[in-house]
Image (cartoon, grey):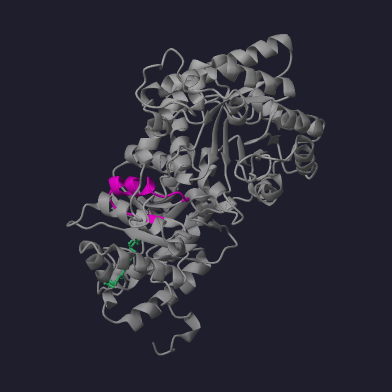
Amino acid sequence: MSARGTTPFAQALAARILVLDGAMGTMLQRHRFDEASFRGARFATHPSPLKGNNDLLTLTQPEAVAAVHRAYLEAGADIIETNTFNSTRTAQADYGLEAHCYELNKEGAALARRTVDAFVALHPGCAKFVAGVLGPTPKTASLSPDVNDPGHREVTFDGLLAAYREATDGLLDGGADLLMVETVFDTLNCKAALAAVEDAFAARGARVPLLISFTITDASGRTLSGQTVEAFWNSVRHAKPDVIGLNCALGPTQLRQYVADLARIADCPVSCHPNAGLPNAFGGYDLEAIQMAQQIGEWAEAGLVNLIGGCCGTTPQHISAIASRVEGLAPRKIPTLEPRCRLAGLEPLNLGPDSLFVNVGERTNITGSAKFKQLVLDGKYEPAVEVARQQVESGAQVIDINMDEAMLDGVAAMTRFLHLIGSEPAVARVPLMIDSSRWSVLEAGLKCVQGKAIVNSISLKEGEAPFLEQARLAHRYGAAVVVMAFDEQGQADTLERRVDVCARAYRLLIERAGFDASDIIFDPNIFAIGTGIEAHDRYALDFIAATTQIKQRCPGVLISGGVSNVSFSFRGNNPVRESIHAVFLYHAVQAGMDMGIVNAGVIPLYTDIPPQL
Ligand code: THG
């Protein structure tokens, strides 16, 4: 695969601020095509109405589409977007044209390709690019369309994955230079698109530059699915996009602060293609070319952008004014970010060496709470969600969710529960830790979360091949991983084995699965002490010593553990258990333990424990 940073696109981005084209829809509307024009001869007898299906014009009015591409090239656009915004099965289902999606994408890319190539032939030496557009689809994987059933979803991750894969293959086969996942309003839809793109690259053994552009829907500064700018960025960073940006919904005035946020936190080029202002009473856009160019020019001068363009309501005049305004201005410098474990729910959670200990709520675990287990077994999901809410209210910054129970369909229970808490903003705020001993349940969970989650857990228990396979999949879904100190010989229970098993897993993850160290969370096993068996006496001490040594041998990783395990021998005596947890954490945190699965809110302060106890 070609390395990032050396493509003609990367070179152009390094040299100047690139200009994207403007709106396609508004330009096509000027033709006032009627039903017969949308259909053309080919779809004359199609059983459902086709008027308004702009993507179909690629096949039935290709000259009109090519004329828009040409107008933007002449206006000074460096990048031409394919007319494929709705060319996914998920979107074309509205017109009964699912069967034509591959062709719509391939032809959409080929038409843009031909138009760009013809332009370059007339203007030799200029660098122009075709961006294959993957739109958001009209459905949301993270939200329920039915207020009475917050657990319902109209579309699944797998359904979107298949739709995006077909579209991506069409765009690449048609000759797209770049791929652009754009107007993202639901991060889970976006993650399905990113996985599809990654799969297509892997199948071809070649990649093209990838652009992601998302939409802030209103003054709340959040996406439609509820994420902040930084939470969104944390949730898609795993795809290592060549450009991350914002488009649509708002005009430049409203978008500026979010572009500035992104410019601060993104360690890759930043783009923006706003609407021509907010829609007026008739749904039109009034911001004129010169004014829009002035605003965007100010962003360029402030060093906020690497690529700019226009969305709804923009015309070749807008793009021409913008292109002239930014010509000769320096592109934004790409910042180098500190390594951090960057998690996200609706809000970001960034963990680094200077972070305080992170409480992971343990109570949404069927194996760890009799109450939660009974609620789920009885199908009482509303009070089960309430358990999650209480954990967050009590200070859990992440919640651990486990549905491992013989009497239960784990995949279905995990899916249902994650859908429900996804609709509960007080819970969805925090990143999730998806806990299961079965990969099928972990994977089902990953298909439900829009944020950057933690997989709990993977290990070398079954050997290197399944470990690497699961690690790569977790990465593809954009998750961090808890790795248990467990190998083919069993759970590591001595200091030396705890450290050795983690060091081996570290090498494999970094060298063979493409992991950043900051996405690796080692769990060197918290076992019960005070069992009466002498060999168990050192378990807590060895965990603490292993924490220090693993951090030395595996730079950049985090350490976690299930804290309540340590006091299992004292079940029934909560004051003693909680004091043991406090003492354990007092030492483990000093040794470098970053996070722990705990009963949030009940652990006393070390200094409050009566000396006698
Ligand atoms: N490492 C990782 N994941 C883990 C663990 C770990 N997940 C599960 C577990 N261990 C951590 N979670 C819990 C949750 C509850 C309890 C212990 C660990 C617990 N529960 C009480 C009991 O069983 O006595 C309460 C029972 C009840 O209320 O019914 O102790 O180590 N990566």
- Which residue shows up at 48% across the image and 64% down it? 397
Residue 129 locus on image (x, y percent): 63, 22
From this view, report whether residue 606 is shown above or below residue 337. below
**From this viewpoint, which residue is outermost toward the left?**
407
From this view, report whether residue 140 is shown above or below residue 357. above
Residue 158 picture quarter: top left
- Side of 286 where 474 appears, left or right: left
Q: Is residue 488 magenta?
A: no
Q: Nearer the viewer, residue 405 or 244?
A: 244
Ligand 1 sits in quadrant: bottom left
Residue 209 locus on image (x, y percent): 58, 29
- Which residue shows up at 63% across the image and 21% down it? 69
Q: Nearer the viewer, residue 89 or 392?
A: 89
Q: Nearer the viewer, residue 222 or 9?
A: 222
Do we see residue 186 in this rendering?
yes
Residue 516 locus on image (x, y percent): 52, 44
- Which residue shows up at 50% across the image and 68% down it? 589
Count of number-bearing discs:
0
Do we see residue 205 in this rendering?
no
Residue 302 locus on image (x, y percent): 78, 45
- Side of 272 where 443 appears, left or right: left
Which range of residues does the magenta coloring cover? 433-452
Q: Quadrant of the C terminus?
A: bottom left
Q: Nearer the viewer, residue 44 or 169?
A: 44
Q: Is residue 435 magenta?
A: yes
- Which residue shows up at 40% across the image and 16% down it? 44
From this view, report whether residue 522 is shown above or below residue 4. below
